[in-house]
Amino acid sequence: MIDPMRLNLRHLDALAVAARLGSISGASKELHLSQPAVTQAVASLESQLGYVLLDRQPSGVQPTEAGRRMTARIERALSYLERGGRVLRRSARLPVLPNIERRITLGQLRTLMAVDEAGSFALASERAQLSQPALHRSARELEEHLGVPLLERQGRTVVSTPTAARFLRFVRLVRAELEAGIDELSALHSQGGGRVRIGTMPVAKAVLLPQSLARFAHIYADAQVSVVEGPYPELLNSLRHGELDILVGALRDPLPVADVTQEGLFSDDPVIVARSGHPLAGRKFEFEMLLEFPWVISAGGTPGRKRWEEMFTSRGLAPPKLRIECGSLLVIRGLMLEGDWLTLLSPDQFLFEARAGLLTRIFGGGLTLQRRIGITTRTDWQPTKLQAAFVETFRQVCDAWETGKTGEAEPFRFG
């Protein structure tokens, strides 16, 4: 897989300008380069990517299908870089730099990301397989070109300045767009070529996402899918930085940021769950009994925690003191088996334990705990065909679950 941050930013710019103008000579004038230099830049990029990107004709040049796909992503990447440059310079109360893409390199941006993620030049050097002097020089040149301090030392660590942190979000979106462009090229000769990166919250549907992945992987055998589980704030940050394509889980109301959008796909109805043999199992239920037993619930600020608290306050009761806060479904289910703990789970989240007679529903009717589950994406996200196909697959599986007569999605079968 080609690392897009090792491409030449000026070559990418030359391709985009030549494709937009339909002319090497026109690109030469706009870029203030000789025509042979523009031609060589495009040829070098074609050699690296392994595709003919421009169709040379006596009347000019036209992008090939590969060229159209790649230049569309290049233009979006350059737009993010321009926006990042504006944010960077304005935050430092400096005039905006025109044509920032012609002043810096992707290697310099790669250095900034590497040091930011590693927290030191030494560790960044090891990870990037570049010498520390080279990294220091690259970072210094980037600061000189942009006219803004980007890195500062705090004790034994090196951190990005607050201004650089805002800039880095756009840098990572540049990387995401170039990665998408390379994926678009892969899809030209391989159905399902490319990547889908999914973030899932610990209490997302335990059945629907695996079913969607199974169906998707069967159709798109060459697709590379990565699933990352984590708390909402971390996943949201990764989504906004282009490191994830989609988040799956409970929707937020209100949204904490303005640059993402949500799509509800089905409703979820949590129920009170305990181990089989729990003192409340099989007894006539009285709500006040719930105060007598320990609970394990997700951390404050999550939709599940909010609904748990409302379950008590709506009845004029103070929620019991939580002894354990936990967002890991695996840990919660395991804890249920170790004592008289209670929790809130969706029926499918303990489906297998219920079938094995390990966990049971204590009470579910009339709790009014319904919440919407769906996907969250960046507002300006332009999915690849592969990513769009996964979203559509997930929609179909969720719709089958929502409308199914049994209340349980039908399992996907191959063949």
Image: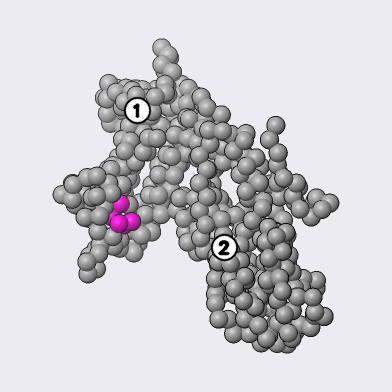
The answer to which quarter of the image holds residue 343 is bottom right
Q: Note whether 18 is above or below 84 in the view shown.
A: above
Which percent across, then down, holds residue 367? Answer: 76, 73
Magenta part of the protein: which range?
Answer: 114-118
User: Which residue is more in the foreground, 245 or 296?
Assistant: 296
Which percent across, then down, holds residue 398? Answer: 71, 50
Query: Can residue 111 be seen from the camera position used here?
Result: no
Residue displayed at 80% across by 73% down:
366
Q: Note whether 8 is above or below 166 in the view shown.
A: above
Q: Which residue is mark 2?
A: 330
Q: Amino acid at mark 2?
A: Leu
Q: Which mark is residue 141?
A: none
Residue 397 in the figure: left or right of residue 111: right
Whether the magenta-drawn stretch holds residue 76 is answered as no
Query: Can residue 85 be seen from the camera position used here?
Result: yes
Q: Which residue is mark 1?
A: 48
Which percent across, then down, holds residue 276? Answer: 71, 70
